[in-house]
Image (cartoon, rainbow, N blue to C red):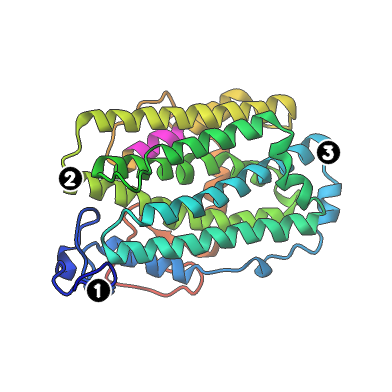
Amino acid sequence: MANKYFNPNGDAILDEKLYGSHPSGFVDFNRPKYKWSVNLYDLMNANTWFPSEVNTANEKKAFDALSDNEKEIYKLTFAQLSFNDSAQEEYLSDFRSLATNKLVKSTLTLQMMQEVNHSKSYAVLLDAAGNSSEVFDLYKTNDALRRKNERIADQFARYISLGENSADKMLLSAMASVNLEGIYFLLGFSYIYVLGDKVPGARDMIKFISRDELNTHLPLFANIFKTLQKENKIDSKVIDKTYEMIQEAVDIELEYGKYLINNFPIMGLHEELITNTVHNYANDRLRKIGLEPIFAGTADETYLQKLVSKHLAMNDVKQNFFETNVTNYAKNSISFDDF
């Protein structure tokens, strides 16, 4: 008798589609239907890290030396980033239940573990800085932070209908994750990099987190999006909704970013820079999932993009960003010829 744990009459391993398949119950890493899924799983494992690897011994002293505006940027940035990871971990549990390819499900499980590790890293960092409770509770008193969190959560919840599944809804749900990994995180990372050497503990923690988000989590959902579109008859109206979703994500990120820099100005940050950075990221995400860019960005990387790119190069990570053609692994410098 077949059930979700063992279905002897289920689909062959290489026939397990991302959505709508009937898996036998086995996870077979030697016969992946999608090579990107096992590549990303291996890269996630190779990049495994723990908050204890980051030196936060002087974080309180570093935080106390910041200007008042820099302190507010620091606190509100980590308040928002910590929500992103918390929401993503819960969302992944729901999204995973929609997938019917067992190896993709395994990769999503590993991503969930990494999102929890990020949440732990914020707790370690903010405890060292001496403002953990204040930062984690800022959504209770800051309207801009609460509004951004509510809008992100709403976009996550909009297309997760566990009782009414469809490939269309799964695709739109995947787009919500592309927005999170590819847009909502990026300004937060860059704000900490702007502070840079003033807060070395925060900077180094964000290096690890951004490596996870940009080198593995974002490519995972970009490949999920493209695979769903390839394997299913996705109506053009659904693709129109993905454009609406990324426009909404851009609006959400710009609203919060402009709130931060206008209320707590620090050297080098201004509205045009924020706008061009978000537009450039949004256009890049659209290209990487096979859609046309729609935003009026700039031809070159902005200062904030260069900061993120510079810090992403830590530990000599070399890979084709979305296709995951890895030439060496970040942590142990393991070479693979078959990627």
User: To which residue does mark 3 refer?
Assistant: 67
Dot 2 corresponds to which residue?
232
Residue drawn at 30 percent across, 51 percent down: 224
In the image: residue 324, left or right of residue 275 = left
Badge 3 crowding class, 10 Å Cα cut-off, few under 14, some 14 to 19, many 20 or more, is few
In the picture of the structure, the residue carrying the numbered disc 1 is 6
Task: Confirm whether the magenta stretch covers residue 21.
Answer: no
Q: Can you say whether 209 is above or below 285 in the image?
A: below
Percent across and percent down for residue 292 are 29, 31
Labelled pair 3, 2 in contact (Cβ < 8 Å):
no
Tell me which amino acid carries mark 3. Answer: Ser
Where's residue 83, x and y in %? 60, 46
Q: What residue type is labelled 2?
A: Asn
Asked whether 241 or 70 is in front, the reply is 241
Q: Where is residue 323 in the image (x, y as percent from the top left)?
A: 31, 55
Q: Which residue is drawn at 15% across and 66% down?
A: 11
Amino acid bearing label 1? Phe
The secondary structure type at the circle numbered 3 is loop
Magenta span: 280-286
Q: In which quarter of the image is the N terminus?
A: bottom left
What's the magenta bit mostly, secondary-structure-wise?
helix
The residue sitting at 38% across, 52% down in the picture is: 95
Say whether disc 3 or disc 2 marks the residue closer to the N-terminus: 3
Residue 5 visible, this angle: yes
